[in-house]
């Protein structure tokens, strides 16, 4: 008789909280990425992009003592940017241009740049500029400024995490390569020993 596996509610809750936190971070980052990047992957603007339409009203509610009109104008601009990015995705698909479906786009600021690579823009330059813009906006419009500041911080967190995940994938690929090389050497040694035993048997 099979016994049901025990579940850990605390572990499930922790994973759920972590996943929700990551989704919120990605949504904040996406709210400015649509203005900063071009050439998104077909599946990138998904649930996190839709969540922005809930984040903005929630952010406005948290700062309900401040005028939210500029923040909702930003949301309108975000909607237009998403539509334009989606049109670009459809056009590339018609042209047969293939790329990773979850690609977060190429930084517009990096166009023609040869000094810094793409990851440098996404991890350092873009978050710094967005947070600087948010800090400037705060003195003029608290709701919009704090939202942009949070988006810049989310850009940095997301960039660092994606960079770390890429490193882990590369390390896994390297480990798999070494494992295959090791197994290959074991197979060659096994075949060599088998050949020696066979020759010894024939000589007898």
Image (cartoon, rainbow, N blue to C red):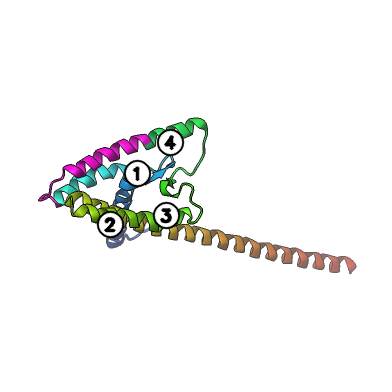
Q: Which residues are magenta?
A: 63-84
Q: Secondary structure at mark 4?
A: helix
Which is in the foreground here, disc 2 or disc 1? 1
Residue in front for this viewpoint, 74 or 3: 74
Q: CA distance from mark 2 to mark 1?
A: 29 Å
Image disc number at residue 89: 4
Considering only order in the chain, which callout, 4 or 1, is on the residue closer to the N terminus? 1
The residue tagged 2 is 17
Q: CA distance from mark 4 to mark 2?
A: 32 Å
Residue 175 in sight here: yes
- Residue lying furthest left: 65
Image disc number at residue 71: none
Q: Secondary structure at mark 1?
A: helix
Cβ–Cβ below 8 Å for labels 3 and 4?
Answer: no
> Where residue 97 sits: x, y (%)?
51, 36
| Image quadrant in which the C terminus is located | bottom right
Residue drawn 69% across the image and 65% down it = 185
Residue drawn 55% across the image and 58% down it = 173
Image disc number at residue 35: 1
The residue tagged 3 is 121
Q: CA distance from mark 1 to mark 3?
A: 14 Å
**The quadrant where residue 153 appears:** bottom left
Q: Secondary structure at mark 2?
A: helix
> Where residue 87 sits: x, y (%)?
39, 32
Q: CA distance from mark 1 to mark 4?
A: 15 Å
| Image quadrant in which the N terminus is located | bottom left
Residue drawn 18% across the image and 54% down it = 139
> Where residue 63 sits: x, y (%)?
14, 51
> Where residue 140 sits: x, y (%)?
18, 51
């Amino acid at each position: 008789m099979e016994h049901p596996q025990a579940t850990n509610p605390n572990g499930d809750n922790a994973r759920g909280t972590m996943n929700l936190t990551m989704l919120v971070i990605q949504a904040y980052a996406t709210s400015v990425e649509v203005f900063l990047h071009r050439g998104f992957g077909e599946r990138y603007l998904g649930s996190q992009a839709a969540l922005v339409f809930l984040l903005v009203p929630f952010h406005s509610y948290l700062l309900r003592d401040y005028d939210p009109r500029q923040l909702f104008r930003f949301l309108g601009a975000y909607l237009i940017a998403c539509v334009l990015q989606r049109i670009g995705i459809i056009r590339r698909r018609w042209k047969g241009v293939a790329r990773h479906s979850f690609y977060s786009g190429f930084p517009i600021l990096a166009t023609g740049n040869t000094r810094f690579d793409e990851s440098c823009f996404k991890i350092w330059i873009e978050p710094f500029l967005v947070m600087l813009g948010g800090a400037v906006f705060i003195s003029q419009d608290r709701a919009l400024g704090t939202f942009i500041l949070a988006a810049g911080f989310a850009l940095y967190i997301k960039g660092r995490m994606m960079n770390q995940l890429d490193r882990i994938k590369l390390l896994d690929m390297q480990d798999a390569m070494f494992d295959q090389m090791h197994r290959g050497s074991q197979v060659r040694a096994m075949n060599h020993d088998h050949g020696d035993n066979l020759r010894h048997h024939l000589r007898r």
